Amino acid sequence: MENEAAVLKTIIQLFGNPKINGKAVKNLFDFHDWIVAGILTKVALHIQQRIGLIDEELAVILGISKQKLVKLNKGRLPIFAGDRLYRFVRICAVAKYVLEDEKNIMFWLRHESLVFGRRAPLEMLMTKIGADEVENELWRLDAGVYT
């Protein structure tokens, strides 16, 4: 699908063209291996700065406390945190594709929606179920289906 290729390209760009063992990460299997190997914490900090997250938001996205985030400053993310970071970046990539502007991503993610029971989409990203619903809603918006 054309949109999936565009989303994958944006994911790679948002992550800053990552490498694992000197080889460019370019597909989902590579991302899996990169997450399992442990994404460097500095990559999460790069995403935080690029997207415009505050520390508390990054900690929630990663599923760790703000204090733990500070302690991880020079290390690798645990697999669960790397997986959650990938999930967030994927949502950002889909949002960029649908909203057509990187500046609109956090605005949309931070504002509550009736679709999510008056929760902000960002709040929904704490679980895979919630993230799936956020992604589904973005694709519905792209298709012109307003719920």
Image (spheres, helix red, strand yellow):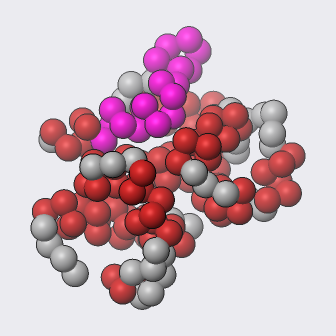
Q: Nearer the viewer, residue 74 or 101?
A: 101
Q: Which residues are magenta?
A: 7-24
User: Would you identify the image quadrant in which residue 8 lies?
Assistant: top left
| 121 is higher (above) or lower (below) than 2 | below
| 121 is higher (above) or lower (below) than 51 | below
Q: Position of residue 58 (x, y in %)?
A: 65, 55
The quarter of the picture where the C terminus appears is: bottom left
Q: Nearer the viewer, residue 48 or 9?
A: 48
Residue 38 visible in this rendered orientation of the protein = no
Furthest toward the top, the residue is 22
Q: Position of residue 27 (x, y in %)?
A: 37, 29
Q: Residue at x 36, y 70 (%)?
A: 133
| 72 is higher (above) or lower (below) than 80 | above
Residue 93 visible in this rendered orientation of the protein = yes
Q: Nearer the viewer, residue 69 or 38?
A: 69
Q: Position of residue 81 (x, y in %)?
A: 64, 50
Q: Position of residue 117 (x, y in %)?
A: 42, 88
The quarter of the picture where the N terminus appears is: top left
Q: Is residue 65 left or right of residue 147?
A: right
Q: Is residue 2 left or right of residue 55?
A: left
Q: Does residue 95 show up magenta in the picture?
A: no
Q: Residue at x 39, y 47 (%)?
A: 102
Q: Does residue 23 show up magenta in the picture?
A: yes
Furthest toward the front, the residue is 103
Q: Is residue 135 left or right of residue 34?
A: left
